[in-house]
Amino acid sequence: MTGNPSDRDLAVLSRVGRPMRRANFRKRVWRPALVRAGLLGAVTETTDGRWRAEWPAADGIEGRPR
């Protein structure tokens, strides 16, 4: 998206209200959603009762924050 967005443009906003970059969207939204849906990697419970999502990345296993 360049210039001023119109009413028809779609954007996923970051925490500060700016359009999220494609790489950040993929890392922070899309891949975790695939893991939660059971389509990629796995979600496991940690010893302290929290949950951790992991999926294969180009350089091995990538873990996400709980």
Image (spheres, rainbow, N blue to C red):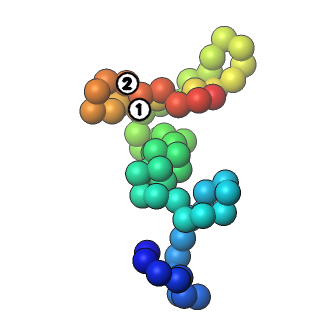
Mark 1, residue position = 55
Q: Is residue 44 left or right of residue 40?
A: right
Q: Amino acid at mark 2?
A: Ile
5 up-or-down from 18: above or below: below
Image coords of residue 7 (percent x, y): 58, 88
Is there any visible trace of residue 34 in the rendered image? Answer: no
Dots 1 and 2: beta carbons under 8 Å? yes
Outermost residue, bottom direction? 7
Image coords of residue 41 (percent x, y): 42, 33
10 up-or-down from 15: above or below: below
Q: Residue at x 53, y 82 (%)?
A: 5
Outermost residue, left direction? 58
Mark 2, residue position = 61
SS at circle 2 = strand
The label shown at residue 27 is: none
Earlier in the chain: of badge 1 and badge 2, it is 1
For the C terminus, which image quadrant?
top right
Image coords of residue 13 (percent x, y): 60, 63
Outermost residue, front direction? 3
Q: Residue at x 52, y 83 (%)?
A: 4
**Residue situated in front as seen by the camera: 64 or 6:** 6
Q: Is residue 39 left or right of residue 16?
A: left
Q: Residue at x 60, y 64 (%)?
A: 18
